[in-house]
Structure formats: structure tokens, C-alpha cells
Amino acid sequence: MKVVTAKEMQALDRKAIKECGFPSLQLMERAGEGVVHALEKAYGSIRKKNISIVVGKGNNGGDGLVVGRLLMKRGANVQTHILADPSTFTGDTLTNFTRYRDIGGTFIAPPPLSPGHILASLENSELIIDAIVGTGLSKPIEGVFAEIIGSINKTHCPIVAIDIPSGLSGDTGSVLGVAIHATQTVTMAMPKRGLFLGQGITHSGDIVVADIGIPTTYADEAMITTQMITGSHITAQLPPRPQDAHKGTFGHVGIIAGSVGKTGAAVLTSQAALRTGAGLVSLATPETLNDIFESVLIEVMTVPIPDIPIRAFGLPSITPLLEFSNGKKAVAIGPGMGSDQETIDVIMALIPQLTIPYVIDADGLNAIATNLAILNTANAPIILTPHHGEMARLLGCTSIDVSHDRLGSATKLSKKTSSTVILKGARTLIAHPDGSVDICPTGNSGMATGGTGDVLTGIITGLLSQGLSPRNAATVGVYLHGLAGDIASKTHGQCGMIASDIVASIPQAITTSQTAATGSLGQHIYESHS
């Protein structure tokens, strides 16, 4: 599913009006219907419910007035708070204000316009609809409007935002002054970028994508390059498991990982590759640590590699590691390898000589950050999996810079290195060298714990070994990783969940994806067809 900027959505609206013959008034009507359908699905019958709608003067306010009229027809007790003088309404918003008023709709219009008055009038509300301002916002909300949004946020009832929470940038997810904290956001036609970036992740609540009739082919024709990974895409890309298969059918994964004090990273990566369906997994380990791994990894073959006195890979390891990589379908490099200069030299020596797809993670990323140009010598597809700190080192900036522009950072590194780049975090991003970006809807804050990145590396390498392209291995792997985290959180809770819980949940995540309903987007993001 395509994810759009405010300008891209405006262009799609204009195209639908011009080519499909949809009057803008009809699109607004469909938007209101989409919101009401989502409300009924989430909260049940709205008959006799006390519902307040807070309306601005733009098109977002017009959507809110349509919602008010439709809710009244369903028997709800609707009270509309209009934050602008109705005499300033124009176009479709004016038309829908007139329609709402003509069926007996009640409204409170300024004066008085004060946060205290708004808060007092919302006291008996069971549900609040935010229709103050939409994706067209370009400057911070200040003054009395900022105070009103603050007052709305202080209420203790659900808040449903129309299209985007008021005050949130539709493009970056930044809060422009102050923003609504929505329980649910019903966004029109296609999700907006700002819902999945920056503070948009915490302000948007559950997200419902309402179909308002704009053909999805328009987004393809417009060359929109950002999209949400859907369950149907994952189902289509999962590796087949033929009945006559044997372990060689599903590939042989090589893991180059581990050093003293960091053996757990190698264990988690290896187990995740197995749980994802790889036929064989071999772990190349510093030989002085091999006994540890043999006692833990029952199903994984370990290959002791000559090491250096600090019990890590060193210059004597290079040739044996290249020999180890022969015959493998995919390799992972970096988890728990350590940061000694000699270990860095090993990684730098491997990159130009490997000829199979490989994933670079953790200490592997820190190594190449010392000389990013080494990736230009690669002779095989590469997937990079940085978190914010690693991304900052790779780009020579700060973690704050990355946080402020996650999508731009991922795209920049992908183009610079001609690699698939996975920027981990809430709503993980996958950037591709062609400039396109995928957004992952799965995952939760319980995954913010040590070792989860190693699990992701194992999943992706396991998928590469089964023949998926780097692009598909990255998107499927990130989605399954997040879904496994969502499944684990239901059993263990987000606070106490650990990385090995995610490993154990990978098979169920795969099974869930194989049987998922077409169009499923993830745990808290849904499509709605009214």
C-alpha cells in the first residue's frame, strides 16, 4: 500500500476529480462515511452515544461536519464545536455546514472560544472527533488553538482524528507546536507519511485507511515510491515448502559472528536463521570459543576459526573464513564480532571477496563506518541493518539528525552504497537503491532490548538462503521479525520480553502470515471499506 505526502495526496484528489468525475463534495462525503464506518467497527453501535466533534474551517472541518450529520442520522447525540466563525466557511465546508445545520445539528461557535469552555463542554462526551486541521498544516499551532488542543488531550475519552491528528506534519511526523494524541486515526484513501515517522507514531493511535473511491492505480502512475508492507505481499513472497524437499532445498546459511563476552549475538543469529526455515546453518566462531557454542547450538554446525589472543577474529582468520563461505547461499557478518582493529581488518578483507548475498550488522557496521567506500568494491548484494546510532556513524552525523529525518537518512545511505538499508526502530524502514522505501507496520516497544537486532539478521539471512532476493528478504524479514515480536508480547508482555522469545515466535509468525487475510497491514493498522 502506497504511503503519500500531503502534496501527493492533493494531486491524487485532483486527478480523481478530473478523470473519474468525482466532485470534491462527493469525496468529502465518502471521507465522512469512512470515518463513521470505522467508528462503528471500533466502538459498536453509536446510537444514543454522546459524541463531540471539534471542527476547524478547512476541508478537515468539512469532513467533520459530514461525520456529524451521518452520526445524527444514526441516532447519536452530537455536539459540534466550531473553532471559526461559520461566516468564513467556503466551498465544500460551507455546503456541509449548511447541511448539518439544516437537519437540526447543534453547534457551539465562537464566542466564547476558550480552552476552559471547550473542556467543560466536552465533560459528558463518550467520544471526541478531531476535525480541526488536516495535512495542509505548514506552521506551528499557537495561542488559543494550541491551548484548546491541550484541553482536548486532557479528556479521558477516546479521540478519533480525521485523516491525521491536528498539529502533526503529514510529511515528517513532527509536532507543529502541539498535536492531538489520538486513540485512532482514520486516514483517507492512502496513509500519510507523517503517521509512521517521528512523533506521528505515538500521536496517531490505531490507524484505519478508509477507501474513498480513488483508484489505487493512480498512485502507481504517479510514481509514489514509499509504501507500507502488507500481509498479502508477505504471503506472496514467503518461500515455498515443496513436499519432496530436503535440507539442501532451503539453503545453507553461514554466520560469521562472536567474540569473548558476545557469544549470545552469534547464538541468536544462528537460531533465528534456523527458525526461519534455512535447511542448514553453520557458525564460524573464534576457535577458543567453539566449546561454548557446541554446548548451546544443538542444531547448528560450528566451525572453529583460528583467532587471536583476545578471543576474536584476526588476520589468521581471513583465509579460513573465505573457505567457510564457499558453498553457502548467504552469509551474515558482524553480530558480536567485537571492535578490535584486527577484527575490523578481517571484515574489510572479506567484503570485496565474497560472491554470495550477505547481511552486515552490529560490529560489522561499525567496522565499515571507518571506510564506507569499501562497499564499492563488493561483488555481491549487501543488506545493511543499522539502528540509529550505527546509522549516524555510517553517515557521519548524530543520532538526533537521523531521528529527525529517518526516511532521508535511510535513502541517502542506500543510494550512497548501492545496498538495501534497513533502519531499525519503531516503524522500521527499508530503503532500496532505486530510491523506494518500505515501511514496516509490525513490531512493538518490547523489542527495544538487546539481541533483537541479531534475531533480525538471522531471519533475513535465512530467507536469502531460501532464494529470496535481497529486496524481498529484507521486507519479508523485517515484517516477520516485528510480527514475531507482537506474538511474543501477547505471552510475555512488552516489559519482560527478551530476544529469545522472539526467536521462539518466528514459526508462528510465518504461519500467521501464510493464513493472513489479504490486505492485512499489521497489528494496529487496518484497511476499511465502507
Image (cartoon, rainbow, N blue to C red):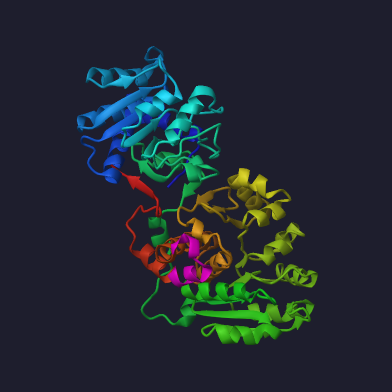
Question: As drawn, is 213 to the left or to the right of 152?
Answer: left
Q: Residue at x 21, y 34 (%)?
A: 48
Q: Report if residue 504 lies within the magenta region.
A: yes
Question: As drawn, is 196 to the left or to the right of 65?
Answer: right
- Counting from the top left corner in percent of width and height, residue 323 is at 68, 81
Which stretch did the figure color magenta?
493-505
Q: Is residue 26 visible?
A: no
> Closer to the camera, 222 or 343?
343
Q: How many marks?
A: 0
- Counting from the top left corner in percent of width and height, residue 337 is at 69, 72
Q: Residue at x 27, y 45 (%)?
A: 41
Identify whether 273 is placed above or below 362: below
Identify whether 2 is placed above or below 239: above
> Closer to the camera, 274 or 199?
199
Q: Report if residue 173 lies within the magenta region.
A: no
Q: Residue at x 42, y 40 (%)?
A: 182
Q: Is residue 376 visible?
A: yes
Identify whether 144 is placed above or below 331: above
Identify whether 363 is placed above or below 313: above
> Closer to the camera, 505 or 345?
505
Q: Quadrant of residue 421?
A: bottom right
Task: Name the dominant secondary structure of the magenta segment.
Answer: helix
Question: As drawn, is 289 to the left or to the right of 456?
Answer: right
